[in-house]
Image (tube, rainbow, N blue to C red):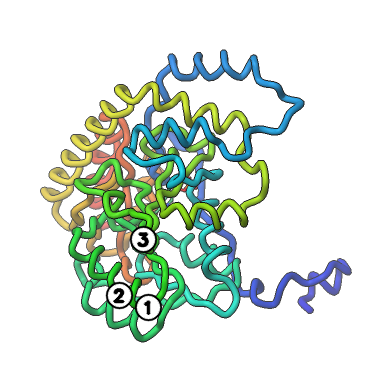
């Protein structure tokens, strides 16, 4: 028993949770917030008005449609998938949790390739899954052959690929995904490709999903659809996997407001895609600008953020940026991305403010 528990008389949490730390992404009240990869643009006002209209007519005394049928039909039409291959949940994090509860858990292993999205390992551990950590190459790509060997040796129940990878921005090419998928199939596991930033990238593993392939592709409304506050994500998965996930997830987990928002957002696809194109152009501008800054090395990104390494003390650079009202995410001491900062692509004005502040910060820290 720890001191606190002895003092309060409260019970201890599960032994295997004691070493876990909560998920932290510090929020500071600054002028330019480029640290959590959200869209810098709110959703179109016509969408917000349409949603408010529909919410007025909801039968609030009744449970929502448990199968989220209308949302899955609409999403399926957009993606060219039958609704039976779609599973929706409160953010892709709930999708990941449900996948782990269903296919991993106590006595089973999940394989992640670090550095990657911390929540893959974190949620896996919360579900009692043993996490095995694989490595990436120096260019942050997963080495397909090494990964296949590791999968054959470890026989994980679930393997995570993140493409584009957070925090590096790396897009895995199709041959890597198919090589890893073949190894996963041979080992009797499930491959989960997290495509939270898929719409910013040049290709998607969604085209590989089929009813006899152990592959699940996970997407979210949080980034591209400007709906981080709404909490909606989904999986594109074999029909039989969707059936299992629906057994495990809590009944009526997806509120009527979430279902409506997800459905109505699809009616505003045009403005959304314009924003994606604008953000990709701005990402390319940031990459070029960082390339020209002495003491900075940006890594190629297929997402709405750019990871870059700074010469010298990255934490000091981060602090100067904050003092200038610009918040980025520091990976200064994160294994595998030491000395790196990650900037989310913002509006052109925000990106200008970031680039100017960074240039000042580098000079200040150097002198
Ligand atoms: C932001 C992000 C998510 C999104 O999670 P939600 O729960 O959908 O908001 C998922 N995966 C990765 C890799 C992310 O960066």
Residue 284, relative to residue 217: is it above or below?
above
Quadrant of the rendering where the C terminus is positioned = bottom left
Disc 1 secondary structure class: loop
Reading the image, the residue beneath label 3 is: 212
User: Which of the two discs, 2 and 3, labels the residue nearer the N terminus?
Assistant: 2
Q: Between 248 and 278, which is closer to the camera in this rendering?
A: 248
Q: Position of residue 164 (x, y in %)?
A: 29, 53
Q: Position of residue 125 (x, y in %)?
A: 56, 70
Q: In the figure, is residue 193 to the left or right of 203?
A: right
Q: Does label 3 point to a residue whose CB lies under 8 Å from ligand 1? A: no
The residue positioned 41% from the left and 35% from the top of the image is 75
- How far is disc 2 from disc 3 in space, using C-alphas? 15 Å
User: Which of the two discs, 1 and 3, labels the residue nearer the N terminus?
Assistant: 1
Quadrant of the rendering where the N terminus is positioned = bottom right
Reading the image, the residue beneath label 1 is: 187
Q: In the figure, is residue 102 to the left or right of 44?
A: right
Disc 3 secondary structure class: loop
Circles 2 and 1: CB atoms closer than 8 Å: yes
Disc 2 crowd, CA 10 A, few/some/many (<14, 14-19, 20+): many
Tag shown at residue 183: 2
- How far is disc 1 from disc 3 in space, using C-alphas? 15 Å
Q: Which residue is most to the left?
A: 292
Q: Between 2 and 229, which is closer to the camera in this rendering?
A: 229
Tag shown at residue 314: none
Circles 2 and 3: CB atoms closer than 8 Å: no
Q: Between 303 and 233, which is closer to the camera in this rendering?
A: 233
Q: Position of residue 201 (x, y in %)?
A: 23, 46
Residue 260, relative to residue 213: is it above or below?
above
Q: Which quarter of the figure has residue 13?
A: bottom right
Q: Which of marks 2 and 3 is in front?
A: 3
């Amino acid at each position: 028993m720890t001191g606190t528990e002895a003092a309060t008389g409260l019970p201890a949490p599960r032994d295997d949770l004691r070493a876990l730390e909560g998920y932290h992404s510090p929020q500071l009240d600054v002028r330019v917030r480029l640290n959590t990869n959200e869209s810098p643009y709110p959703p179109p006002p016509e969408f917000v008005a349409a949603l408010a209209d529909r919410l007025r007519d909801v039968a609030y005394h009744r449970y929502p449609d448990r199968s989220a049928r209308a949302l899955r039909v609409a999403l399926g039409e957009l993606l060219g998938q039958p609704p039976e291959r779609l599973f929706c949940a409160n953010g892709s994090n709930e999708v990941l949790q449900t996948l782990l509860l269903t296919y991993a858990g106590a006595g089973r292993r999940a394989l992640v390739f670090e550095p990657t999205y911390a929540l893959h390992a974190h949620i896996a551990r919360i579900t009692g899954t043993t996490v095995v950590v694989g490595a990436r190459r120096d260019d942050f790509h997963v080495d397909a052959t090494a990964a296949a060997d590791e999968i054959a040796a470890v026989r994980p129940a679930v393997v995570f690929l993140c493409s584009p990878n957070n925090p590096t921005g790396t897009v895995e090419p199709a041959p890597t995904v198919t090589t890893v998928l073949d190894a996963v199939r041979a080992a009797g596991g499930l491959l989960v490709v997290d495509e939270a930033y898929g719409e910013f990238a040049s290709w998607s593993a969604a085209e590989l999903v089929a009813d006899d392939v152990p592959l699940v592709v996970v997407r979210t409304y949080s980034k591209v659809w400007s709906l981080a506050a709404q909490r909606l994500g989904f999986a594109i998965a074999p029909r039989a996997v969707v059936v299992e996930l629906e057994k495990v997830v809590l009944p009526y987990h997806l509120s009527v407001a979430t279902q409506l928002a997800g459905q109505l957002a699809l009616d505003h696809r045009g403005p959304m895609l314009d924003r994606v194109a604008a953000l990709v152009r701005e990402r390319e501008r940031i990459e070029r600008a960082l390339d020209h800054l002495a003491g900075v090395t940006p890594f190629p990104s297929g997402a709405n953020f750019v990871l870059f390494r700074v010469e010298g003390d990255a934490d000091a650079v981060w602090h100067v940026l904050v003092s200038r009202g610009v918040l980025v995410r520091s990976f200064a001491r994160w294994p595998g991305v030491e000395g790196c900062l990650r900037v989310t692509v913002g509006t052109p004005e925000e990106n200008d403010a970031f680039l100017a502040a960074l240039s000042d910060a580098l000079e200040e820290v150097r002198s």
